[in-house]
Each structure stands twice: as C-alpha cells, then as structure tokens.
Amino acid sequence: MGTPAARPGATTRRVYALGSLAAILFGYDNGIISAAILFIPHELPLTPLLKGTVVSATVVGAMVGAVGSGPAADRQGRQRVLLAAGVVFTAGALGAGLATSVTALVLFRFVIGLGIGIASVVVPLYLAEMAPAGARGAVTSLNQYMIIVGTALAAATGYGLAFVGSWRWMILIGVVPAVVLVVGLLAAPDTPRSLVRRGRPEQGRTLLVGLRGDQAAADRELAEITTLERQQRDAELGARMSAGWVRKLLLLGALLAVFQQITGINTIVYYAPSVLTGFGVSEVTALLFTFLNGLLNIATIAIVVRAKIVDRRGRKPVLLAGLVGMSASLFAVGLAALLLPPESPVLFGIAVAAFVVFTNTFSATWGPVLWVVLAEIFPLAIRGTAMALATLFNWLTDFFVSLTFPTFTALVGAGVVFLAYAAAGVIIFPIVWWAVPETKQRSLESLEQQFRGGGR
C-alpha cells in the first residue's frame, strides 16, 4: 500500500510543474523587454512608434498563437501543443537576441509572441483539467504564479545586465528555460479530459488514478467526463458555438479578457522603467525597483496559491477587490503626475508606491483569476477553441495598450493615461458584479450542466 500512496503525489507534482513551466517563459519573454528597450536604442535607433512596435510585436504574435492553439489543443491534445510552444520559444529567443536590424528584432519578437500566445491558452487549460474540483482555483493560479516568477527572473536579469547594457544577453537567456520545457514535455502526459475526447479513455483513467490517488474517485470522475463527451460527440462545432448559452459564455469570456488589460497592467509591465526614468531617476535605479517589486510579486502570488484564497473566497469577490486596489493606485500616480513637477522626489515615491500596490493587487486577483474563470466556464467540446477566442481579445487589448502607451504619453502625459485606466476599472466594477458566475468548489462537468440549463 505504501507505493500507491506515494505515487499520486509524484504524478501530481510532475504534471503541475511541467504544465506551468511554459508560463515562466511567458513571464520572462514578456517582461524582459521592459529592461531591454532601455538599451536597444543605443544600437538600433528607435522612434516612439518603433519602440511601441518592438514591444507590441510580441503581442501580435501572441494573438496568432492564441487563435491557432485552441483548436489545435482540442484536436491534438494539450501536451503536444505545449511542446510546440517550447520549440517556438527557443527559436524566437535565439533570433531576437542575435538580431542585427530593427526588422529582424520585430520579426523574432513576433515569433516569441507565438509561444506566449500558445502558453496563455493552453497552460491554464492544462492545469484546470488536471486539478481536482476543490483545488482547481489554486492549481490554475500556478499559471499566474509562474508568469510572475518569469517576470521576476526577467527583472533580475535586466538589473544584473544593466551595468553593461547587454540587451542581447537579456533576451538570449530565455533560451535556457525554453530548452528545459521541450525536454520536460517530451515525457509529459496529456490531460484526462483530452484523452477521453480523443478516444483514449483507458489512458485517461490511468492518469486520473495517478492524479487523485483513489481508484473509486478516478472512476467517478471518468464517468462524468465520458457521459458529457458522449452527449456532445455527434454535435457539429458550429452548432455548439451557436447555442445561446454558449454565446453568452463566449461574450463573458471575451469581456473579462478585455477587462484584465484595460485596467492598465501592461503599461507597467512593459513601461514602468521608462516611466520612472522620465521622473528623473537612472536606468539602473528604475530596473532595481522592477527587480525588487518582482520579488514582492512572487511572495504575493505564493500566498494566494498556498492559502487557496481563490477557492476559499470565490472568484467574483477576488475580482471585485482587485478592481478597487488597481484603480485606486493608478488614480494616485495619475493625479500626482499631473500636479507635481516631473523630477520631483515626491512624484517618484508616489509612483513607486502606486506601482507596488497595483502590480501586487493584480498578481493576487485579476492575474490568476481571469485564467481560472476562463478555464472553468466553457464546455468541454469547444473548451480549447473558446479559450483561444477569449484569449485573442486579451491580446488584442494588450496590443492596443502596448503600442499606444508611448505615443499617448508623449501627447498628453503619463498622468492623463494612468487616470484613464483608473476610470476603466471603475466602469468595469458593476459589470463584473452582475455578470460573473461563482464557480468555486464545482466540477467542470457540473458547471457545464448548470450553464446549459440557463443557470449562472
């Protein structure tokens, strides 16, 4: 009896670690540009528009990767698509780090974005389908935790290499975790639900026994999955997507994906060092703040995951609390930027405090919870495709934010831009209050039956 008891823990840890490793690359390759963009103009001249293009090229790639990865994950399985992401991450980091022109840099930043887009769809899907219902919020939150870890690693790398200004090595270091991801995923399992959907129920049952450590519980879960799959097997994709209850869920998912971005998170992820240097501090000081704040973000999301706050408090209350904290912090820095001189130490202090509050609030709320909700609300038959569509809207909004922030800031100032994003959070609050269903402590199959019957 001793061996079977140990086996589920080992299986569970392995699949969770491999499933979330791609999120580290998401965070690293997404975050490293905030440091690299300070030094790229020393070698490759950049106008404000070109600067926005270099940053947002990854976002365009992420849109394409997100759209393609959802249907591919439904057809080929979650594990194979994540493996492809690892290969793409490797090629993109190599090409961008060795680029000799702005055109080449933009092209390979686009390639990196393909990997980020795949990870943004498939990682939360993979984790949610591996997790038991009672811990699904915490397990799926590992996605955001690993993104934050990757972002912190990017901040540490950026700060460490700032003294020599080596933007190329900042990007090239991303090759290492990409190779680790490829090697690890070669032996990784697919999810039980994906295996059943693709006609491999026995493999799904074996994996469920390993994950749950209880044969009876695994059999019950497999029966739920199999029954639901049998009900949907003969339906066409178009019919499933056009069903009224599915359209409502697709609209909700798209809105939540947009809301996460128009709160302004990537104005800080991509441009916080640039904003702080505009407030009169050195590049090294700005990157030191980014590094230290990244460490604090790791601690914040670790507390959220370990305390299972998303599973205990519920999805909606956490989202609402996040909107309050994020809007208040952006309002503070926006107002200070309008009222205080640009190089005022007081302005720098307020900006640092506001950025800390904002990013840590996001890491505890909208960062993980959006992906938890998206991975829960869509029906199994189209879950990958629906996740891809919702994630596309997330990346479209991210593209708008990342491309326009330098130009808008040059035209009206950072203060006005931050106030606009703070106002967006206020507008979003009542929509989330009314529209978002509570999904905690429910199996994915029971949620699907509830939504199918018109419940919220």
Image (cartoon, grey):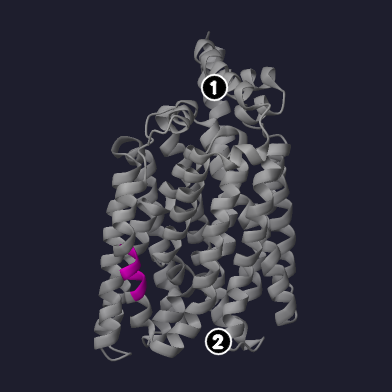
**Quarter of the rendering containing residue 230:** top right
On residue 8, which mark appears?
1
Residue range (magenta): 420-425
Residue at 41% in and 38% down: 138
Position of 71 with respect to 358 (left or right) is right
Residue at 52% in and 45% down: 247
Is residue 139 visible to us here?
yes
Q: Of residues 220 and 232, which is closer to you in this image? A: 232
Residue pointed to by mark 2: 48
Query: Up-down: is 175 above or below 334?
Result: above
On residue 429, which mark appears?
none
Under tag 2, what secondary structure? helix
State yes or no: residue 393 in magenta: no
Q: How many marks?
A: 2
The amino acid beneath tag 2 is: Pro
**Quarter of the rendering containing residue 440:** top left
The amino acid beneath tag 1 is: Pro
How far across and how far down the image is residue 114, in percent? 67, 59
Q: Of residues 311 and 426, which is closer to you in this image? A: 426
Residue at 58% in and 57% down: 392
Query: Up-down: is 185 above or below 1?
Result: below
How far across and how far down the image is residue 302, in percent? 39, 46
Under tag 1, what secondary structure? helix
| Comparing labels 1 and 2, the label whose residue is closer to the camera | 2
